Image (tube, helix red, strand yellow):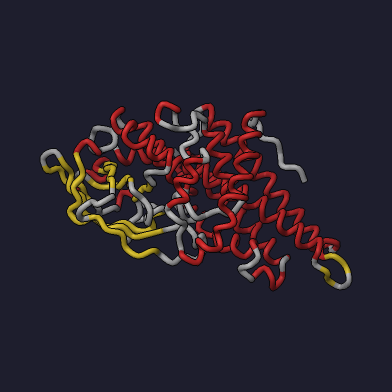
Amino acid sequence: MDTPKKSWMDADLTLFQDSTRRLFEKEFAPDEARWRKQQHADREIWRKAGRMGLLCVSMPEAYGGGGGTFAHEAIVAAEQARAMVHGFSNNVHSAILAHYILNYGTEAQKQRWLPKMATGELVGAIAMSEPGAGSDLKSIRATATRDGDAYVVNGAKTFITNGLHADLICVVVKTDPAAGSRGISLIMLETRDLPGFRRGRLLEKLGQKSLDTAELFFDAVRAPACNLLGEEEGRGFAQLMQQLPRERLLIAVGAVATMRRAIDETVAYTRTRQVFGQPLIDLQNTRFKLAECETVATIAARFVDDCIARQLDGTLDLPTAAMAKWWTTQMNCQVIDECLQLHGGYGYMLEYPIARMYADARVGKIYGGSNEIMKEIIARGLVA
């Protein structure tokens, strides 16, 4: 079936989508198998993505970016998910961290970091989760203590996307541990040759095995006081909350694109697979299951399309973004499971994309705030 037309697309965005799809399919997807074996992409892939204009597409041109909008970010996120290129998280780098710097950074910080992020000279990460604190950011224990013209950062972070290659990390810390959420701040760290900073092991994950996910340790790491994001301590929690709808919507965008890829793969497989002397797709059960999956994918695409339009006009709220995130990631796992079942035993073989999608998609219900937290956000809006 034809993909539902997006309300926010125009001719220029369609051309951008076509070129982005070709780049991910031809320039990055062929390396995924090798990246999965080594558990990370090559560092050079970031510079390659920068040369191709895939990084910081919505950053102003004055800071080296593409001068686009969230629509461009959504297209890049969708095409990267569709191509199953998980070896580098452009979402974290370009669509999340870069926007923290753009929205809360000083002019000097923007000039210092954003152009290098756009070229891939700097790889960005954001360090929130800790061994004892995930979705509950108020429980973090990492600290940053002011000492003259510097902050001294201590603590440990885990599950950090882009953790192996990150040269620029936004670390979520407590500058006032007694103040609860009002004591949280964001400190930027440039990690090259930084005393006291070390990377732990690459974490072996169920899925997305080509994406470097690491532990990070900060032992009396000194950061210039001017690396505080927002120029005032204690604003970190509010900054995180303001940016989370964007992050969660991008997760939903990726989930919708993955659903579409799963259905396309399964339609193609069932056309060629012979069962009882006929193509598998000719069996009623197959057709009904595919019809169910197509219906879910179409509803998801329509909903996320509306959310993107709202993000573009500045009206996307936290509960709606939470709805998009939890429902699309839940449905993505459900659709992929149905599609895998139609592949039979071959669906369990990692040489088939559907098997990798099955493992890769599961984390969608966890990162960006677990789906249980998403439902709590929605519920609070109902009883407020």
Q: Position of residue 333 (x, y in %)?
A: 60, 58
What residue is rendered at 31% in x and 49% in y?
138
Task: Establish if 66 lies above or below 141.
Answer: above
What residue is rendered at 86% in x and 62% in y?
282
Q: Position of residue 256 (x, y in %)?
A: 62, 47
Task: Establish if 340 lies above or below 67.
Answer: below
What residue is rendered at 16% in x and 41% in y?
150
The answer to whether one can see residue 132 in this image is no
Residue 139 is left or right of residue 16, and the answer is left
**In the rendered image, which quarter is residue 304 located in?**
top right
Classify the position of the C terminus by image quarter. top left
Residue 312 is left or right of residue 273, and the answer is left
Q: Position of residue 52 (x, y in %)?
A: 52, 40
**In the rendered image, which quarter is residue 253 located in?**
top right
**In the rendered image, which quarter is residue 117 located in?**
top left
Q: Position of residue 265 (x, y in %)?
A: 71, 57
What residue is rendered at 19% in x and 40% in y?
224
Task: Establish if 33 lies above or below 21.
Answer: below
Residue 317 is left or right of residue 268, and the answer is left
Return the residue found at the far left. Answer: 148
The answer to whether one can see residue 262 in this image is yes
